[in-house]
Amino acid sequence: MSTALSTVDAVRAMILDGRFAPGARLGEADLAEAVGVSRTPVREALRHLAAEGLVEITPNKGARVVEWTQAELEQVFDLRAEVEGLAARLAAQRASRTQLDDLARIAAAHLRATEARRRDLDLLYRLNSEFHGAVVAAVGGSSFPAVLGSLVHTAVLVRTLHTFDAAAMLRSAHHHVELVAAMRARDPLWAESVMRSHLLSARASLLGPRTDHRTTSSAPGA
């Protein structure tokens, strides 16, 4: 792995772990010291993360963690519902038996972690990310990971579990289990519907009722 790429991963991890709040300044010198590299790979990493949508770079002001407005977050969730809904639809048709077994394993582990008396949020984040990544991997190709990367890699969205109550977290875990059932049934419309409901439920838990009373577009066949 190149120094530039490892620096991107290190800086991204610090943002997603919450070390830097939305809107926080990202000083090149401080980041270089924290990662243990020179300022040049840090500068390259910040440009890379700006392309991902995690960082905003302003001339003469430097880099800051992106702050998402309510309207922007609404759009991100709606886009994820559309794109990941389609991914689930295709995965239901394309996933191998091994991939389905792996998804079932992850979903079961996520449900157990959710039902645990003391929830490990880091474990829940990892399992949730692993599950969604496995759905996308079951589609095949490189287009879905590329499109979803900029939507999923946001500090605000990655930390949404902090805003979920117990009922919302359990509902999310059961969505994963149901999605596996839909994929095992080779039912693309069921799978797409579950994924869309999963993400729109997460949107409601994080953002609350839609203030403009919009409705998202209907799933195909609805």
Image (cartoon, rainbow, N blue to C red):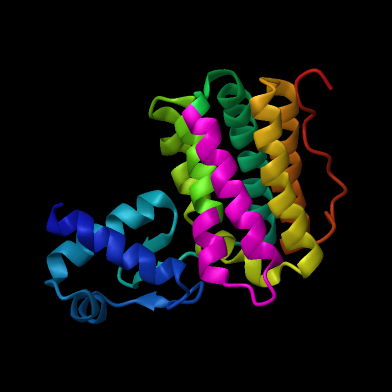
Residues in magenta, as a range = 98-127
In the picture shown, does residue 68 fall above or below 198? below
In the picture shown, does residue 189 fall above or below 168? above
Residue at the (52%, 25%) spot, across then down: 97
Image coordinates of residue 117 in percent, x first then y, are 70, 75
Is residue 126 inside the magenta stretch?
yes
In the picture shown, does residue 55 fall above or below 198? below
Is residue 128 inside the magenta stretch?
no
In which image quadrant can residue 65 be found? bottom left
Residue extending farthest right? 213
In which image quadrant can residue 215 be found? top right
- How many discs mark residues in the rendered view? 0
Image coordinates of residue 175 in percent, x first then y, are 72, 45
Residue 59, visible in the rendered structure: no
Q: Main secondary structure of the magenta part?
A: helix
Residue at the (72%, 67%) spot, across then down: 164
Camera-side residue of 146 and 182 = 182
Image coordinates of residue 102 in percent, x first then y, are 50, 39
| In this rendering, position of residue 209 left or right of residue 116 | right
Image coordinates of residue 162 in percent, x first then y, are 64, 72
Residue 83, visible in the rendered structure: yes
Residue at the (71%, 65%) spot, across then down: 115
For the C terminus, give its image quadrant. top right
